[in-house]
Image: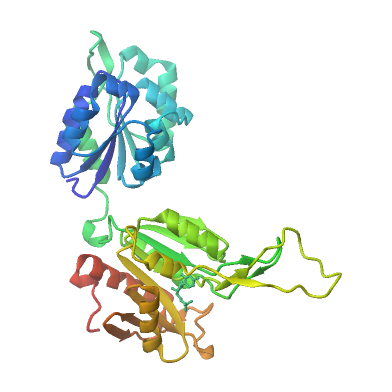
Amino acid sequence: MLSGKTILLIIAGGVAAFKSLDLIRRLKDQGATVRCVLTKGGEAFVTPLSVSALSEEKVYTDIFSLTDEAEMGHIRLSREADLLLVAPATADIMAKMAAGLAMDLATTTLLATDKPVMVAPAMNVRMWEHAATQANVATLASRGVLFAGPVEGNMACGEYGFGRMSEVSDIVAAVIHQFKDEPEKADRPLTGVRAMVTSGPTHEAIDPVRYIANRSSGKQGHAIAAALAALGAETILISGPTALPDPTGMTIVHVESALEMLAACEAGLPADIVVCAAAVSDWRVASQADQKMKKDGGGPPDLVLTENPDILKTLSAPSPTRPGLMIGFAAETQNVVENARAKIIRKQCDWILANDVSPDSGVFGGDLNTIHFIDADRAEAWPKMSKQDVAARLAAQIVHHVIGDERGGQDGD
Ligand code: C5P
């Protein structure tokens, strides 16, 4: 029931922590990947060794451990999870969550996440009933935090009442319930795939108020990001300045210049698929003026230009972080296929969508695009179609490539 799901289990310091070991096993029985964060308090009840043995994953304990931060920062821990589950959730960790504190790896990850969070509270009955805890529960619930329990029963401290952690089977059921309304995987074949799309123009500053730009609208790149996200890809859209609204269902990074776009792309790695649809300025001003340039005195300035890095080429170069599928665009006016093939070789990318940008094509700023799809051994001429349809057709090719799904393929059309 949880196949393909990654649960980030945060084990806080409560007597019920011993049940978390069973919880790991039961979640894994359902097909989930379980990655664990142990708080200092949690470590007093269960050892990292037993947690890692059961989860068959590395256990994360310390935000200041440089190795962990380099290998898998707290952002990535949350990014790679489908659900954060705090079990046991002590009164203390819930108070920290409600207050937005980031004191250790667990609380920092909980503050940094945009994924669903579920808590399984476990504490003494009077701690549970305390007005402070109840206020925190209300705050967390109002923010969308999900609750599994607590339940009424005998406590480790010898008392009876509410505050006992839910049975492991009930927590697992609550986790399964959380995912039950998700669209079937068949509708979202790129689930688990990380995609990055560049879009729009770049602005290259001359001085604080002037810049060099181009007429790219960003419509094609934005449509591709939306198509990939709709198919379930975890999508990052890195956009230069456009007039378009931010699409939903993805992470959006706004940049101005080519250098910023490259830095944002590199920060977004690793990715499985990168589509470079941005019209990146080939040049920037070699040295930007700190103050607005004055027209008085000495005539027009000499603008010395320097070349911008080629983002598509940089990301396509062989490296351990090279995305599996690098896709670029090529604006051509003649010899479309030959020029695009040469570009695949020069930039070491995998696919090129060559578009006809002859003056009467209306591609820049328009809603239609005429594409030649080109890879190492294929060239398909796509009919003139809307940028949305180009995005959908490219996304289908990507599905076909990634999972070999016949339904995604467009071959032979
Ligand atoms: O070489 P040309 O500009 O025609 O290549 C276009 C392709 O390269 C597009 O996919 C564009 O997004 C990408 N590109 C880039 N960085 C640059 C220039 C182009 O990513 N500096």
Residue 51 relative to residue 267: left or right: left
Rendered residue at 31%/14% (across/down): 125
Q: Position of residue 227 (x, y in %)?
A: 36, 66
Kindly tell me whether residue 350 is visible in this rendering: yes
Q: Residue at x 18, y 48 (%)?
A: 3
In percent of width and height, residue 48 lies at: 24, 28
Count all numbered tags in the image, as a single digit: 0
Q: Is residue 16 visible?
A: no
- In which quadrant of the rendered image does the C terminus lie? bottom left
Whether 36 is drawn above or below 281: the answer is above
Q: How is the image coloured?
A: rainbow
Tell me where residue 87 appears, x and y as whole percent: 28, 29
Q: Give the side of residue 58 with respect to residue 369, left or right.
A: left
- Toward which corner of the image does residue 108 lie, by quadrant? top left
Give the residue at the far top of this rendering. 158
Q: Residue at x 26, y 49 (%)?
A: 181
The correct choice, above or below, for 53 with respect to 319 in the image is: above
The image shows residue 161, relative to residue 167, as above or below, that is above
Q: Is residue 9 above or below residue 43?
A: below
Q: Which residue shows up at 16% across the image and 45% down it?
A: 31
Q: Residue pushed farthest right?
A: 297
Res 272 → quadrant = bottom left
In this view of the protein, which residue sits in the foreground, 394 or 352?
A: 352
| In this rendering, position of residue 353 left or right of residue 307 | left
* Image spot of residue 363 (x, y percent): 49, 81
For residue 224, what is the image quadrant?
Answer: bottom left
